[in-house]
Image (cartoon, rainbow, N blue to C red):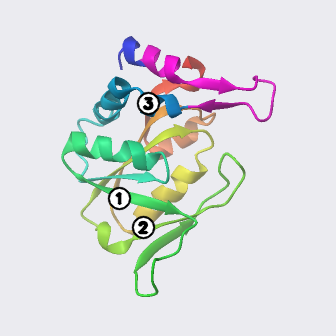
Amino acid sequence: MSNQLRTRLRAATVWHGDRTDDHWYADVTGWWRAPGLLQDLGPALGALFEDERPTVVLGPESRGCLLGPLVALHFGVGFVEVRKNRGPSCDSDAWRRRTTPPDYRDRHLDLGFRKRLVSASDRVLMVDEWIETGGQALGVQGLFEDAEATWLGLATVVDGLRSNEFRRRLGLRSLVNLRDL
């Protein structure tokens, strides 16, 4: 990734609170407001897995659903939304579901997608804006293992993981590390 993209990401990120505050957080909504940055994020995330050739890109609600379609367009493939804590829209919907290990807020989420959207022949790439604990991503990975699809990895803008074990297990590749912001 270019230093220019890293600089633009840093400039569009606003930090609230200070590092000693438990409620300190990054506001990344500036990424969506900068059209040039938004245009470049899909191809930049896709470039992390350029040689893998996914057949489908997926993203969890909500920000994975913003970035995922941009990456899917880069590869010329479809997109699957992974829903959080939502049931099927009707009793006849066939859903694949999984509960996550604790996420960055120490919550266990119920993740799911419609079964008909992913087959065993799919090569799946997950996209999200930020990873901190890996709990949500591990839950999503489990969903696709249940579908017998091939997990290619996770492309994320910011890597805030502390565990190299989870980086390897998820096949994580990122544009920036948290310390770069």
Q: Which residue is mark 2?
A: 113
| Mark in the foreground, 3 or 2 | 3
Q: Which residue is mark 3?
A: 33
Seen at 25% across and 42% down, the residue is 52
Mark 2 or 1 closer to N-term?
1
Seen at 60% across and 51% down, the residue is 135
CA gap between label 3 and label 2 equals 28 Å
Marking on residue 80: 1
Residue 148 or residue 12, whichever sits in front: 12
Q: Name the spot of residue 129 as percent of width and height, x first.
A: 48, 38
CA gap between label 2 and label 1 equals 8 Å
Examine the rendering and report whether any part of residue 74 can be seen. yes
Helix, strand or loop under label 3:
helix
Residue 151 or residue 127, whichever sits in front: 127
- Residue 25's image quarter? top right
For residue 71, above or below residue 47? below
For residue 138, above or below residue 109? above
CA gap between label 3 and label 1 equals 24 Å
Helix, strand or loop under label 1:
strand
User: What amino acid does circle 1 point to?
Assistant: Val
Seen at 56% across and 52% down, the residue is 136
Is the Cβ of the residue at disc 2 closer than 8 Å to that at disc 1?
A: yes
Examine the rendering and report whether any part of residue 174 can be seen. no
Q: Name the spot of residue 2 as percent of width and height, x first.
A: 35, 15
Q: Give the extent of the magenta segment.
A: 6-27
Say left or right for 12 vs 105: left
